[in-house]
Image: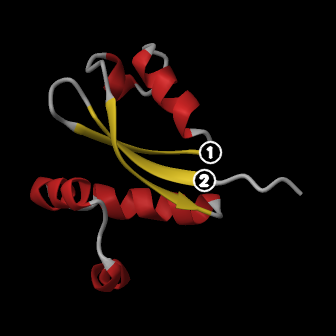
Amino acid sequence: MENKMHYFYVLECADGSYYAGYTNNIEKRIQTHNEGKGAKYTRARRPVVLRYYEQYETKTEAMQAEYRFKQLKRPEKERIVQIGGYGIEESKEL
């Protein structure tokens, strides 16, 4: 069985907004976004830069992380991107 990793990632768009997503190939996905072939949201906001990612063993875990991130307000998202994560204690609460 193939041991493929799954990623939750956060991009910063050219307009300063964040885009969160899921992929199983992070390098290819960022390239796709920057080619204008990715999500509709990022097409008009190129170029995008990877600001944060987390690696998971299952697609479900990665997509749950994406969902949790999208539920946060902008200041909380900025904090996660700046410090590089939720922190051990906080991740249990989210």
Q: Which mark is residue 24?
A: 1
In this rendering, the answer to whether 69 lies above or below 20 is below
Among the 4 quarters of the image, the one containing residue 33: top left
Q: Is residue 3 left or right of residue 83?
A: right
Measured Cα–Cα span from mark 1 to mark 2: 4 Å
Q: Nearer the viewer, residue 34 or 72?
A: 34
The picture places residue 20, in percent across and down from the top left corner, at: 36, 45
Q: Secondary structure at mark 1?
A: loop
Q: Nearer the viewer, residue 57 or 45?
A: 57
Q: Is residue 29 left or right of residue 9?
A: right
- Residue indicated by mark 2: 6
The picture places residue 64, in percent across and down from the top left corner, at: 47, 64
Q: Is residue 1 left or right of residue 79?
A: right
Locate the N terminus and report the quarter of the image it occupies: bottom right
Instruction: Name the residue type under label 1.
Output: Asn
The picture places residue 6, in percent across and down from the top left corner, at: 60, 53
Q: Secondary structure at mark 2?
A: strand
In this rendering, the answer to whether 33 lies above or below 81 is above
Locate the C terminus and report the quarter of the image it occupies: bottom left
Category of crowding for the residue at label 2, using alpha-carbon neighbours closer than 10 angstroms: few (below 14), some (14–19), many (at least 20): many
In this rendering, the answer to whether 8 lies above or below 28 is below
Image mark count: 2
The picture places residue 49, in percent across and down from the top left corner, at: 32, 31
Q: Residue furthest left?
A: 75
Among the 4 quarters of the image, the one containing residue 42: top left
Category of crowding for the residue at label 1, using alpha-carbon neighbours closer than 10 angstroms: few (below 14), some (14–19), many (at least 20): some
Instruction: Name the residue type under label 2.
Output: His
Among the 4 quarters of the image, the one containing residue 21: top left
Q: Nearer the viewer, residue 76 or 53?
A: 53
Seen at 27% across and 61% down, the residue is 71
